[in-house]
Amino acid sequence: MVDLIWLVPALPLVGFAVLLVAGRRMGEPAAGWFATAMVGASFLTAVVAFIGLGGLEEQVFVQTLFTWMPTGDISIDAGFYLDPLSGVMILFVTGVATLIHMYSIGYMHGDPNFSKFFLYLNLFVFSMLVLVLGDNLLMTFLGWEGVGACSYFLISFWFTKPANASAGKKAFVTNRIGDWGFMVGMFMVLFTFGTLSYSEFLPLAPGLATTTATFIAVMLLIGAIGKSAQMPLFVWLPDAMAGPTPVSALIHAATMVTAGVYLLARINPVLAVSADWVLPLIAWIGAITAFVAATIAVAQNDIKKVLAFSTVSQLGYMFLAIGVGAYWAAIFHMITHAFFKALLFLCAGSVIHGMHEHQDMRVMGALKKFLPITFGAYIVGWLSLAGVPPFSGFFSKDEILAYAFDVNPVLWFIGLAAAGLTAFYMGRQAFTVFWGTPHWHPEEESVEEVPPAVTGTEAEVLADADDPAATSAATVVATAQPAVDVSDLPDDFEPHESPWTMTVPLVVLAVAAAFGGLLNIPLPSSLHFLERWLSPVFELGGPTKLSLSDGSILLLLSVSALVAIGGTLAAAAVYLWHKVPSAPLEPAVLANGWYIDSSITAFMGGPGTAGFQATADVDTKVVDGAVLGVGAGVGRLAQASRYLQSGHVRRYALSVGVGTVVILGFMFTRVVI
Amino acid sequence: MELFPSDAVFTPDVSWVALWPMVVMALGGLLLLTISSLGKGRIPRPFYALWAVLTSVGSFITAIPLWAQVHGWEDAVLWYDPEVDPTGPFSTVGGVIAADGFSVFLTMLIAVSMVAVVLVIEAYLDREQDRFPEMFALTMFAALGGMVMVSANDLIVLLLGLETLSVAAYVLAAMDLRRVQSQEAGFKYFVLGAFSSAFFLYGIAFIYGATGGTGLVHITDFLAANVLLGSSGLMLLLGLGLLIVGFAFKVALVPFHSWSPDVYDGTPSPLVTFMSSVVKVAAFAGMLRVLVMAFESAGADWRPVIQGLAVLSLVGGALGAIVQSNVKRLLAYSSISHAGFILLGVEAASDVGTAAVVIYLTAYSALVIGSFTVVTLVARSGDRLHTLTDYQGLGRTSPLVAGLFTFFLLAQAGVPFTAGFYAKFSAVIAAVDAGTAWLAAVAMLSAVIAAYLYLRLVVTMWFVDPAAETDTSHVGVPAAAGIALAGCAAAVLWIGIFPNTLTDWAERSVPAVVQPAPPNLVESGDEADADVEFEVGPDGMPGMPGPMPGEMDFGELDLESLGIDPAELEAMLEGGDLGFDVDVEFEDPPG
């Protein structure tokens, strides 16, 4: 049954090819259903292969398709590598992707590029599966680049909005930094082991020299940081939310961004033999990212931005898990996160859909009775992300925190603080959007005596987001009433529930998010299904064994639960019962993400661009300057012929001349006397 | 006393099979000029295009038997002849023309590129309503020069090829009479080209002074047997440095690159396809054969220079391109960056490196011809629209052209499953294999920077609304250009997905050090009455031009026709006063 593994990526590829040729003719909704069917079939195949894998003795299956690149003594095959880790990955990737495809049929209804959207989505799923299933680092890199390109295209899908095109660019550029690290690491692997194949080099990893292992680990870590939006390369992910919401759910929450975590988990034997500061480095990057992103999420007003920073924060937990040696816990959290974060994004999409494309939470409120199904699903996602028992997020996050406590209590404390913030900002979102008073009727605003200066066009609000002073002012005002113009909504506007193609995936994901924790119940240890299933993969990586007693684990569980509930209650006090003013809790520095993004932008726009310009001017200024300085005498000689040309040719010739002098000068030093 | 009378003629051994591709190209060009001058305006222009295509195809076909002779007949399916054994690499015309895997493959590559180039020129001339059959003839002569360069086994012949190529290229650059930039480009190219050719020739003179010869095989042997110290060592190294300068100019390496953005900008767009493909192939081939083969033992001297040039070109090309607003200038800088990548293969000075160069040149030719074909089409009538503004919104007005351009650009950026990725991959492998991993890291970093500029073009085409002054008319694809584009795109995709085909060929495309065949004194025949074999000392032998040490077999000689009295020869041999060893077997011993 495992022989069918090639079908898993092949089916979405077929979907892509067919849509490429005939997508426009299929039209709406046939193209969408076709794409959904392809990914769905891929999911079923993955289930079959997964069951087959369980029946194998070795639990590793390598399928070589063809020899791809014979280069000298090294040859690289195109093939697939199915083991417990990639088996789990393909299951949730295809499963979540199928639901999101289906959801998109409703969400993208009426879009002029309907079939093109599904074409990209299918290509994305194919790339993601190649990334996960690839038998070697080069295949993984292929998928890595493929998902990056699809992400870029999908962020810019509505390219008529300049913000989207620019966000797409930012994602691309940031990712290239990570790609560089991946490439260098990959070549280092190739020249250390003479192969890129996981099944060949991973078993050899324990014999690596520490420096080599450290170099490979750090380079691949740079790649992982870029892809998984960790500090300091996280700036692109929140902007990536400019794309259609299903894209945010699929690519920027559930699957692609977890690729960095997957990569680190995959190379765990290399991490194990690298210098002893590498794993703590990963843990600290993760913990700090988790905390900082959570603080930023507290002060966002865009419903999707809150979820975006929350994604960055949750990815931080996964890095933390890797860093403390709890590889399987990282994968566990990755799976539950895929369920509940995809769910939350899809709910947000449903809300946005019902609100006629308004994304600002300040114009929402009291939506629970208008969008009952969405509301119900959202509750599950919310409590799951907030870490309230017994939803899945509670179990997976708590495993990470338990391991962190075991390794370094400071890490645990940061993680716990971030968990409290998570519960708080999610409570804030839930209460603002679904409870309280509705804010979408212009006449109600006038009742509340809106100062005229506050209502502006949407464009101004967009511009304000970049201007800290204006945003803080807007944030202060927002505590009383919306600062966003809703005059484009009709007077009798009422939010409406989404069509069934959108709500069915919500319900399915809600069930998964609610019960995902069953994959691995913390106590007793006989219920550690996932840990046991994944253990062969991490054998060489020397995973941390939890040394805590059952009592301590129970204690930690209770603390986590209390923090989650406490955070939620705090949010309720501020945003539901209005006992505490919210303005001081949303300072400008948080709303603007600690100014990290704007600092980078300021640098790239100012000194950075100037730097590029200066380097490019090397021809005309630096080189020519040096040339003209050195060759002043020659220059005077050449004055005579100056009338022939504007002088450029002479300068070029001098540039050639100076180059020659340098080369010949070098040759002088090489003479053997 | 002299063994041979002074009027005896030594003719070099000529293997016509090695020369046919060049001969076809030369004759094709000459005949085209003749026909066009006789036919005046009566012959329709497409005839010339067809003629040039057929000539290039003919040149390719005549290279197949040569391939077979070098690699074996099994490879040349069409010409399969089990009776004939392959000879392996050989050299001919007195050892100045090499026929090895390297020269055959690149000759074929030039011939194929020529087909695409001619098609693009035809599409351009058709649009511009120009007659100019000279454009075809000049590119054919330039291609001939390129073929000579890839086969040259002697520095003088290399220079001959270089000049044949360059002089034609100077004229091509100035071919657009309506635009003053074109004349300016031709002028600049000529002045600077002459400047660098002078360096090159000077370098040859130094090397001749140091080694006593210009043949690459001679230089190889000489350097293997001798260590040059002091002033003769300096002479050799200065010569080597000057040769590098000459090559660096031709392939546009920083800091010898300044001409290339101006020239690319001014030259009629279809001809830039030629300049960036065939010219680069030829110049890199020459550079590789000289440095990696002839100066292999001096690797420690030239490798740092090439590494320095590679770094400068990789980084300078990528950064320079970022601020360009003219697409042709942007691509010119990008090709400087590509040249830096190719240097990784040269710098490796190994068989892996040579294969990487061959792979890169092949992939790059397809990419760059495709890209500049698009540039030619988008420029519209008058060849004038080249700024980024002119590409705004192209994705909506002309999705086919924009799609193809996007594909070529992404391939140039090195996206997997395209030829560009595999080429870069091979170059990086070669560099790391040669122990210069740091250079590979620099190259990858520059590829990251360069990706930005390709992306910028892609974004301009698909995601930017056309400005008011942008020409938003649909860009059509004429049949001729369409064939070229389809061919390039197919090659880029094929190499990307099935690179092993190319690798198989590239790995056998290695320049070989082949001793020259002995000169023919007289055709062997029935009348031969002696089998003469000489072993010649270092001073050569009397009556033969130039020193030619080593053993040589003169084969069977007809002594009578040479005016040698067998009895006298016999006496000389016994007297032992010849100054060299000679072994003669008489069929009919005198006396």
Image (spheres, coloured by chain):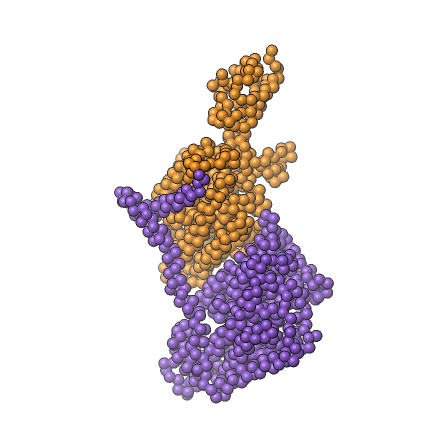
Residue A379 appears in the figure: no
Q: Quadrant of residue A22?
A: bottom right
Q: Where A196 sits versus A584, above or below? A: above
Q: Quadrant of the C terminus of chain A?
A: top left
Above or below A302: residue B242: above
Residue A45 position, x and y percent, is 66, 65
Q: Residue at x 49, y 71 (%)?
A: A238
Return the residue nearer the eye: B381 or A473. Answer: A473
Q: Which chain is orange?
A: B
Q: Is residue B91 in view from this perspective?
A: yes
Quarter of the N terminus of chain A within the rendering = bottom right
User: Outermost residue, top direction?
Assistant: B591
Between B277 and B353, the one nearer to me in the picture: B353
Residue found 52% across the figure and 84% down from its top: A570
| B242 vs B369: above or below | above
Residue at the (40%, 52%) spot, across then down = B329
Tell which of B57 and B311 is nearer to you.
B311
Residue B38: image x %, image y %? Answer: 41, 34
In this rendering, position of residue B395 left or right of residue B189: right
Residue furthest front as drawn? A673
Chain letter for the part of the structure drawn in purple: A
Give coordinates of residue A169: x percent, y percent.
Answer: 46, 64
In the rendered view, tell whether residue A449 sits above or below residue B451. below
Residue A276 position within the rendered picture, expressed as x and y whole percent measured from the top left: 57, 65
